[in-house]
Image (cartoon, rainbow, N blue to C red):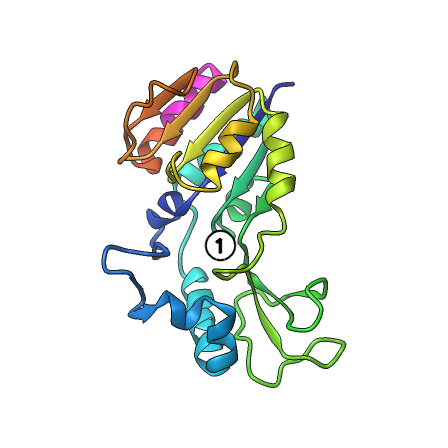
Amino acid sequence: MKTIVVLTGAGISAESGIKTFRDSDGLWEEHRIEDVATFDAWRRNRALVLEFYNQRRRQLATVQPNAAHLALARLEEKFHVQIITQNVDNLHERAGSTNILHLHGELTKARSSLDENLVYDVGYNDILEGDKCAKGSQLRPHIVWFGEAVPNIMVAASLAQKADILLVIGTSLVVYPAAGLLSRASSSIPKYLVDPRAEAMSHIRNLTVISEKAGTGVPALVDKLLGI
């Protein structure tokens, strides 16, 4: 059974109503990223950071996987599929995909601010000041903030090396980590980029560019790969 490795970014979840991380004015839900998505922000105003992610979690409970998420789950009928996502939502899981690596953390989990290995499922519930881990430290969102190391990046690189087919959806091939993962995949395998802003890249071997939104481009590509 061939292995398909899929890298997904904000573009795939935007069609479900999830706000993209950084829009044209550099704000996220009227907040500067520096005020809600860095460790310095956590130290300065923990209440604001907690409430910001509580709002994101509440919103996540109201949205559904879209056609692109559902199509990727169908690929498991004939392929071993490994999804590597930059998104912190759980829409891939809810669509039925079974092998998902989250590069930037998971919104529905909390972790100890003392021991990063202490991770707890919180679902769509709020994380409040005074909520503590087993070691007595405040729980924080299980999110990789700007300036923090991405602990799963080497795991993702190893997975990319094993791909027989590589899909990149809703993110650019010129922005890290997509570009880095692309270099780990064999130059001889088929590669597909699905993004409405995508442009032809003649320097990348065996790359097919599909300049469409994920909700239309991905189901059509999945049908092709499944031989439908």
The answer to whether residue 146 shows anywhere in this view is yes
Position of 183 relative to 107 (above/below): above
Q: Nearer the viewer, residue 152 or 194?
A: 152
Give x and y (percent) for residue 124.
Answer: 52, 67
Residue 56: horizontal and vertical position, in percent?
Answer: 43, 66
Percent x, y of residue 122: 60, 68
Point out the residue furthest to the right here: 135
Whether residue 225 is situated above or below residue 124 in the rendered picture: above
The residue range painted magenta reads 219-228
Q: Does the magenta stretch include residue 226?
A: yes
Left or right relative to 10: residue 82: right
**Which residue matches tag 1?**
89
Label 1: element kind: loop
Q: Is residue 99 visible?
A: no
Q: Farthest residue toward the left?
A: 25
Q: Which amino acid does label 1 sit on?
A: Asp
Q: Please give left or right for residue 92 compared with residue 62 in the image.
A: right
| Magenta span main SS | helix
- The quadrant of the picture occupied by the C terminus is top left
- Residue drawn 42% across the image and 51% down it: 64
Question: Quadrant of residue 131 in the image?
Answer: bottom right
